[in-house]
Amino acid sequence: MRQRLSLASVIASAALLLGAGVALAGGWATVTPDPGTVAPTAGETTTVGFTVLQHGKTPVGQGNVIVNASGPDGQVLAFSARPEGKAGHWVVDLMLPAAGTWEWSVTMPEQLEVSTHLEPLQVATASPSAVASGSMLPILLAVAAALVLALVLVLRRDMRTIASRALQRP
C-alpha cells in the first residue's frame, strides 16, 4: 500500500511539474517591421507598419498592441497600434517630437511576450523651409499689407497734387 501511495505521489508531482512548465511557457511573438519603413521627421506624424506572429508563425490580428518609443533625451512615449491589411499586420501613427535616435519596441501587455529586435528609428530634423514658411507667413502678410497701404497713401497724395495743378491752369 505504501509503495502504491509513493508511486502515486511521484506521478502526481511529475504531472504538476510538467503542467507548470507548459503554463509558465506562455505565448510569445515576433515583430517584423515593414520593408522600406520611412524615417520619421521630428514633429510630424509618420505611419509605421509591422507584422506580429505568435510563436513566429501564426499572425496576431487582435489585442492591445502598444509601440513604445524612447528618445535621445530619455523621453518615453507610448502609441496604440491598430490592425490593418492582412492578418497579423499592424500600423501605428508615430509623432516623435525630437530629432535623433529613437529606440522602439512593441508590446502586447495582456497577451503575449513579444520578442522585438527592431532597428532604432533615425528621426530627422524638420526642414528649415517648412518651419520658416509656417512661422513666417503672418509676418510676410503684415509686411505686404503695410506696403500696399503705403502705396495707396502715396498715390492718393500724388493724385491730389495732379488734380490741384490741373484746376489752376486756365
Image (cartoon, grey):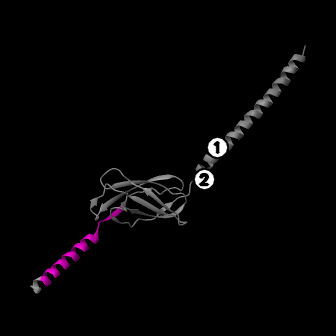
Residue 82: where, in percent of width, then height?
Answer: 38, 52
Image quadrant where one finds the C terminus: top right
Write the residue at 87% across / 16% down: 167
Image quadrant where one finds the N terminus: bottom left
Viewer-proximal residue among 7 and 63: 7
Q: Which residue is mark 1?
A: 137
Q: Which residue is mark 2?
A: 128
Q: Residue furthest front?
A: 1
**Disc 2 packing (10 Å; few <14; some 14–19; many ≥20):** few
Main secondary structure type of the part rendered in magenta: helix
143 over 35 or under it: above or below: above
Write the residue at 47% across / 53% down: 46
Instruction: Tell me whether the residue at label 1 lies in contact with that at label 2, contact meaning CB atoms closer than 8 angstroms.
Output: no
16 over 112 or under it: above or below: below
Is residue 113 covered in magenta?
no
Q: Residue furthest left?
A: 1
Three-letter code for the amino acid on which mark 1 is drawn: Leu
Write the residue at 70% across / 38% down: 144
Query: Residues in magenta?
Result: 5-31
Residue 154: numbered disc: none
Residue 163: where, in percent of width, then height?
Answer: 84, 20
Residue 33: where, in percent of width, then height?
Answer: 38, 60
Viewer-proximal residue among 155 and 121: 121
Three-letter code for the amino acid on which mark 2 is drawn: Pro
